[in-house]
Image (cartoon, rainbow, N blue to C red):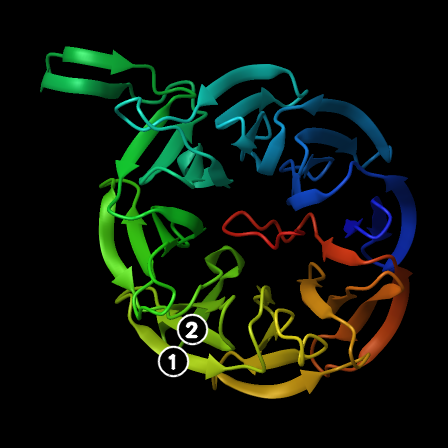
Amino acid sequence: VVVESGDHHVSILDGDKLEPIHRFQSRYALHGGPKFTPDGRYVFFASRDGWVTKFDMWNLKVIAKVRAGINTRNAAVSGDGKWVAVANYLPHSLVILDADLNLSKILPVMDKDGKTSSRVSAVYDASPRQSFVAALKDVKEVWEVSYNPKADEIPAGMIHDFKYREGKFIPGFLNPQRTQLDDYLDDFYFTQGYDEVMGASRNDAKAAVSGQVVNLDARKKIADLELPGMPHLGSGISWQWQGKTVMATPNLNEGLISIIDMKTWKTVKQIKTRGPGFFMRSHENSRYAWTDSMMSKEFKDTMQIIDKETLEIVAELKPEPGKTFAHVEFTKDGKYVLASLWEMDGALIIYDAATLKEVKRLPMKKPVGKYNVWNKITKSEGTSH
């Protein structure tokens, strides 16, 4: 599924032949990437102006639309395919829809004291937990909203005795569990077990520590992350390296990739890149990670390829000098890479993932993002912004 922002269309590609098979007009300014149901049949799009669209991939038809906000950040689809959560800047709300886009619940986003309202920075699905997790822009909390009808009740206010239920409780289904923090958490990435989130803190961008790890079971911060500048954790990736699970994140302010040991939370290495980048992608069958420098004026046209074993840049690709080259998606088997020439007269450039040689090009109008239903990105997302 390719989002073309140049003329506000979506193209559907045949994943085997890598050829377009359908194209339709989208709402203005799609954001946050389309989200798929588990069977791959339906895909949901959220636009900046609050519209959520449901598209049937089998019949290639838009089958439902609803407006869930005025200024919307993104949407998430539940792991069971039954619910859609919509994160809004305006109004300050998290909206829960059913899979047919009927309104189920509006959660006004307020702090625990009910005094401060907040924009919602992002919402993601945590399938193993049967919940949505939301980052808040203006309140120092992380919300977890369970879509399990049998979820435990949530204590509200002062509880005298949990065992004998002396105090106030609210249903756990479609209500927020709050984790109180010392700093705002705008952007985050799930660990592989989904029990923790790694988040970017909103402190001094020049500080050495600009990230935090929050345990969703303990409901508290458990570690700091040494991430200079402004890490884009929402575009982080992870893999096995020397017997460890490591996570890599690009930096929106500096030409750096930070590699973090996900057990010790220590920075293993910082890889110097051509300039600040927004996206990073890899595949379990590929030895390479791909990252751009699209935030750099001089090197926005250069993609850098990192060897996941040596943690070194081993190649650079510059297909069209001076033209923005960013956002990568792999085919299901990891054999091919689709990269965006992010211009009105742009293209999808398809590469052999092993040889890094160009295979072919598909003309596109500013293809800001492409998404493979079988490479479901639930831990992070490449945002078309």
Figure quadrant of residue 72: top right
The alpha-carbon separation of the residues under discs 2 and 1 comes to 6 Å
Q: Residues within 10 Å of mark 2 (few under 14, many from 20)?
A: many
Residue placed under numbered mark 1 in the picture: 269
Identify the residue at image location x=28%, y=37%: 179
Considering the numbered disc 1 on the image, is that residue within a helix, a strand or a loop?
strand
**Numbered disc 2: secondary structure:** strand
Front-lying residue, 52 or 78: 52
Above-or-below relation of 108 to 137: above
Which residue is depicted at the point 34% across and 59% down? 211
Q: Amino acid at mark 2?
A: Ser
Residue to which mark 2 is pinned: 258
170 relative to 366, above or below: above
Q: Position of residue 246 (x, y in %)?
A: 40, 69
Front-most of residues 245 and 12: 12
- Find the residue positioned furthest to the left: 160
| Residue occupying image coordinates x 89% and y 64% | 345
Q: Earlier in the sequence, mark 2 or mark 1?
A: 2
Q: Is residue 335 visible?
A: no
Tell me where residue 349 appears, x and y as whole percent.
81, 70
Label 2 with label 1: CB-CB less than 8 Å? yes
On the image, which quarter does residue 67 sit in?
top right
Q: Picture coordinates of residue 290 (x, y %)?
A: 61, 73
Q: Position of residue 97 (x, y in %)?
A: 59, 21
Tell whether 72 sits left or right of 260.
right
Relative to 192, 39 lies left or right: right
